[in-house]
Image: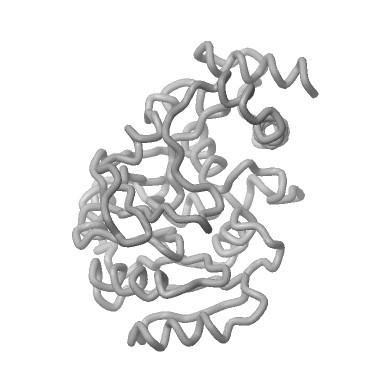
Amino acid sequence: MTNPESDITVLVCSYRPNTYLVEQLRSIDSSMPGIPITIFDDSEQTDETLRLIKESSLSNVRVLPGAKRGSACENFIHGLSVIDSKWVFISDQDDVWEMSKVQDYMDVIRNLDADLPQIIFSDASLINEAGEIITDSFFRYQGLSDKVLENDDILFRNCVQGATLCLNNAMLSLLKKSLEGERASQLAMHDWWIAILSKYLGNWTFIDRPLLRYRQHGSNLVGARKKTNLFLNFLKDPYSSYKKLKSLKCQYMLWLRVSKRLSLDNYNKPELSMLSKFKLLAFKMIF
């Protein structure tokens, strides 16, 4: 098998980045010195992004225009449609990579079939704005489980944190094919869609170790939320819950169309947990 270390790149999506970007870029480079980094910047002006890259003192970073749609999901999908590499690491603009991250992923990659669409993701620790650790497991904090990838629950509950994702060229091709004639705005989130593709049309590997320090702060688009009761959330903020369910239904209907176009099985009777069955029932009752 060829050495995959010469065929990897990092994709960063940015929007009005601050000094966290400098720490992020340096941590990526420390994990694998010289690794190519491409930033898809969605800011109105890229001057500040370019200044921060200069401050990082790294020569292995380039900046390309983002999707200019005002959506992190659409910017990531845009970047993944442009980037060309055998393996692509996805990165946010304000986290910190652990020193062993790239090597630990490479240890997994060397044993995978690169002809099959592949994703690798890991656990993460959660840090505050000052870099202090809040919890050493993003998975436990949010009540996530990779077991949702073992049945059809992945259609209704995501477990893949996009900032930890690595995917191969076959998955990049599958991602593009799945969205032909569709709009990225129909996705609940890019990492969730990629997880679904890996479940039904590829392969997934979870590294049960925190290889990323995920920064929680006021500007996070999604952010980490401690596991709470779904019904209590709905009662506390019905409008937000309604919007999330509506977005999820849009993605689910997209999957039904795409799975049919790609000649997969019909998902009218998915194997679901009670929580996922409740969400499916909510689609029918509310929308």
Tell whether 107 sits left or right of 256.
Answer: left
Residue at 64%, 45% in the rendered image: 178
* Quarter of image, res 265: top right
Q: How is the image coloured?
A: one colour
* Quarter of image, res 81: bottom right
Tell whether 63 sits left or right of 86.
Answer: right
Residue at 62%, 70% in the rendered image: 42
Residue at 44%, 25% in the rendered image: 148
The image position of residue 106, as x and y in percent, is: 25, 56
Instruction: Determine whether 112 is above or below 23 in the image.
Output: above
Q: Residue furthest right?
A: 287
The image position of residue 39, as x and y in percent, is: 50, 73
Judging depth in this view, the residue of 194 and 53 nearest the camera is 53
Judging depth in this view, the residue of 220 and 285 nearest the camera is 220
The image position of residue 232, as x and y in percent, is: 56, 21
Quarter in which the C terminus is drawn? top right
The image position of residue 102, as x and y in percent, is: 26, 60
User: Does residue 254 show up?
Assistant: no
Tell whether 104 sits left or right of 202.
Answer: left
Q: How many marks are shown on the rendered structure?
A: 0
User: Does residue 248 show up?
Assistant: yes
Quarter in which the N terminus is drawn? bottom left
Instruction: Determine whether 234 is above or below 240 in the image.
Output: above
Judging depth in this view, the residue of 67 and 267 nearest the camera is 67
Instruction: Determine whether 183 is above or below 99 in the image.
Output: above
